[in-house]
Amino acid sequence: MHEPKGRYLSPTGPRGFIGDLVHFAHKIPSAPVSRAFDVSALAGPRTRHPLRPSWSCLFMKAYALVGAEHSPLRRSYLEFPWPRIYEHPWMNCALAIERQYLGEDGVFVGLFRAPERQTLAQLQEALLQYKNLPLEEVGFFRQALRFSRVPRPVRRFLWWSTLNISGFKRCKRFGTFGLSTYGALGAEQIHPISPLTTTLTFGPIDPVQGRVMVKLIYDHRVLDGAFVARRLRDIEEALNGPILRELLDGEVAPVPAPAPAATAAVAVDSLWRPHLPAAPARAPRAD
């Protein structure tokens, strides 16, 4: 009697994208730094906010505000044609988002440009679009699926060239930092890997004490551990400072009326590519 055989699956779509990401992430000499945050003051205002913004949006904007002040967080290591470090003028966040593709769960990446220059409401609306729009209607997702069908040698060369030749294109296409979390699932990542200079992650938030373990994984060719530890402290201060104030201001703000169907696409597009002033409002602090 013959035993039943399994089947072979082609690693296309999200699996192909993650395969390429892991391939280049393993080349980064990364190290994690962690710190316990107290975010108890944000829980009530976040719940009462008309949009109830995701914790990911709160952490994203807090980190982006710190990155706007500390230029090393906007730097990337490039290898070709010679080793050098590129510094981007603003922060771009690559957020890992779980979506279904062909009946299976897969990880896609949504890019949020300059979170420090957007409101929490804008970030939350963009996140909902990334989570709810059909995959083919989201440019980043559509390109990732199409790119996954390209032969692997060609994909790997294009990944390598984007990560190592032009700093501007690297930050535009992949972001200056990543954000990934399993906190809502009650789990915590130990050491997430990424080809980016830094990746922010946080675990479950204690509903009673409001404590959460936050980690910043960094490329040791660009940053040092003591600098990263101080920036974790700054992120906590940003959460309990400007982020908390924005939540409190939003508590009494009226819920905005839904945009007319004719202008909805324009409004969403502006969230992904916000207007960027020619010069920052204040000069970043040197470290």
Image (spheres, helix red, strand yellow):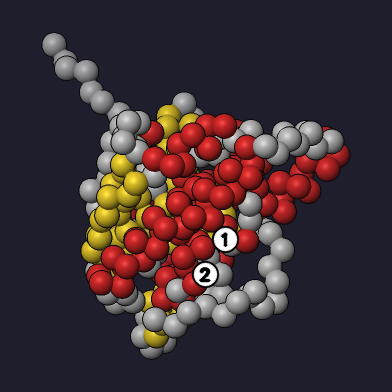
- Does dot 2 land on a helix, a strand or a loop? helix
Of the pair 140 and 85, the residue shown nearer to us: 85
Indicate whether 66 appears above or below 58.
below
In the rendered image, which quarter contains the N terminus?
A: top left
* Residue 136, picture quadrant: top right
Residue at the far bottom in the pictured view = 82
Residue pictured at 46% horizontal, 26% vertical: 103
In this view of the protein, can residue 207 be seen by the observer?
yes
Closer to us: 56 or 237: 237
Quick one: SS at disc 1?
Answer: helix
Q: Residue furthest top?
A: 1
Q: Amino acid at mark 2?
A: Ala
Q: Position of residue 228 (x, y in %)?
A: 31, 67
C-alpha distance separating marks 2 and 1: 7 Å
Question: What's the amino acid at mark 1?
Answer: Glu
Tell me if mark 1 has few (under 14), some (14-19) or many (20+) residues whose alpha carbon lies within 10 angstroms of its own: many
| Residue topped by disc 2 | 68
Residue at horizontal 39 percent and vertical 55 percent from the top: 236
Q: Are marks 2 and 1 in contact (CB under 8 Å)?
A: yes
Residue 92 picture location, percent across and down: 53, 62
Q: In front: 98, or 115?
A: 115
Disc 1 designates what residue? 116
